[in-house]
Image (spheres, helix red, strand yellow):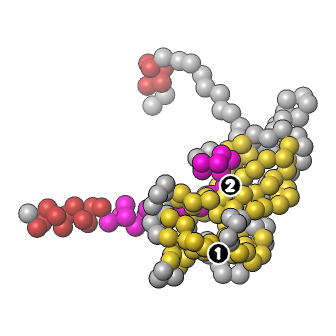
Amino acid sequence: MKAAIIATMILLLPAALFAAPTMGVYFTYNGYQMSYSPTALEMFDGYVYVHDTGCYLNAAEFELCYPTGIAQVGWTIPETSLQLGDPDTGISITYWPPMDGWNPGYNLLCTLKLFAMMGCVNEDGSPTALADGQIKIVVHSVSGGILGSCWPENYLMDFTGLTSTICPTCISVQETNWGAIKSLF
């Protein structure tokens, strides 16, 4: 019986090690849609969320990288928070009261006001420079990490930075039968 329990724990260990909390830019207020297709000269919002922190989050540090054709024109943080820096060059934000990382499982860190200087397609239907553009959460230029702090112990945790897509390109599919697909291999 002990051997079965130890074997199960050993098998579950890699899953626990790779289940790091994540941080990304989402385009819906509930933190689930990571792609958006803006029109030319459109102002839209992006929401920076963290998922699966498993603690009371009281601070975060990160930096954002935008594609050509997307400009950040502002951002807001929760009302009782303090900030140092800005998302383009590295931002540090503190939260009080700390945010519950268990319920509902995600937390809004800040809201970005973004502006699309061009749309996803030109007038002739060809893709613009925004096609498959990426908004990335990258390491803070000073601290060298994508970090969060858990209250009350104030230990630091690393987040995995996610990439969101502006103007995702569509991939066409060809209808065929199963025999034709099997013949490819």
Q: Is residue 109 above or below residue 166?
A: below
Q: Residue at x 75, y 67 (%)?
A: 87
Question: Is residue 122 left or right of 176 when viewed as pictured?
Answer: right
Near mark 1 (Cα within 10 A), the count class, few <14, some 14-19 or many ≥20, is: many
Image mark for residue 107: none
Give the position of the N terminus as an image quadrant: bottom left
Q: Nearer the viewer, residue 45 or 119?
A: 45
The answer to if 28 sits in the magenta stretch is: yes
Disc count in the image? 2
**Residue under numbered circle 1:** 94
Residue 171 lies, in percent from the top left, at 65, 32
Q: Residue at x 49, y 63 (%)?
A: 101
* Residue 34 visible to an observer of this rendering: no
Q: Residue at x 70, y 66 (%)?
A: 79
Q: Residue furthest left?
A: 1
| Amino acid at the residue labelled 2 | Tyr
Magenta stretch bounds: 13-31
Give the position of the C terminus as an image quadrant: top left
Image mark for residue 47: 2
Secondary structure of the residue carrying tag 2 is strand
